[in-house]
Amino acid sequence: QVQLVESGGGSVQAGGSLTLACAASGSGFSTQGTRWYRQVPGKQRELVASISRGGTTYYTDTAKGRFTISGDNAKNIVYLRMNTLKPEDTAVYYCYADVRNAFGTLISIWGQGTQVTVSS
């Protein structure tokens, strides 16, 4: 069974930085693409950034210029470096991945989320 575990969340002052990590674990799998989403209470989960297995990245307007997504295929870890954080970046950040499992089946997996709190 493949699992995603996020880490790196925490509290920071506005203007600060955090790096989130999303680690995939299991056996016989390969990650095809990973996305970071975020959600605040009462609102829909929104996409922040994505990266393909080949390294192609995509950023929403929210993330452009401030966030950087990167990945290490060998370690099955994807990072989200967040700079110049704003109070409105406060949310639970979730990792999502499309994974091909040991049977060749493509499955979608969510992590449990990690809280990011930015104070003014």
Image: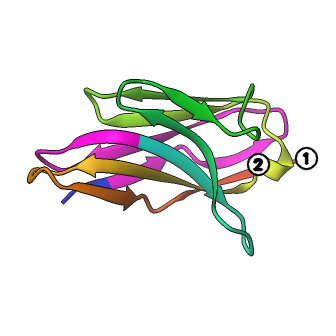
Foreground residue among 95 and 108: 108
Q: Is residue 81 left or right of residue 64?
A: left
Q: Which mark is residue 120?
A: 1
Report the residue that reaches farthest toward the bottom. 42
Q: Which residues are magenta?
A: 4-33
Gap in angstroms between the C-alphas marked 2 and 1: 11 Å
Tell me the mark number nearer the camera, choosing from 2 and 1.
2
Foreground residue among 101 and 70: 101
Does residue 8 belong to the magenta stretch?
yes
Q: Is residue 46 left or right of residue 104?
A: right
Foreground residue among 25 and 103: 103
Q: Quadrant of residue 82?
A: top right
Task: Residue at 54%, 43% (x, y): give it.
Answer: 8
Task: Residue at 49%, 34% (x, y): give it.
Answer: 79
User: Which of marks 1 and 2 precedes in the sequence?
Assistant: 2
How far across and how far down the image is residue 3, in percent? 29, 56
Crowd band around label 1 with a 10 angstrom C-alpha radius: few (<14), some (14–19), many (20+): few
Vertical order, 9 against 52 (above or below): below
Task: Residue at 28%, 31% (x, y): give it.
Answer: 75
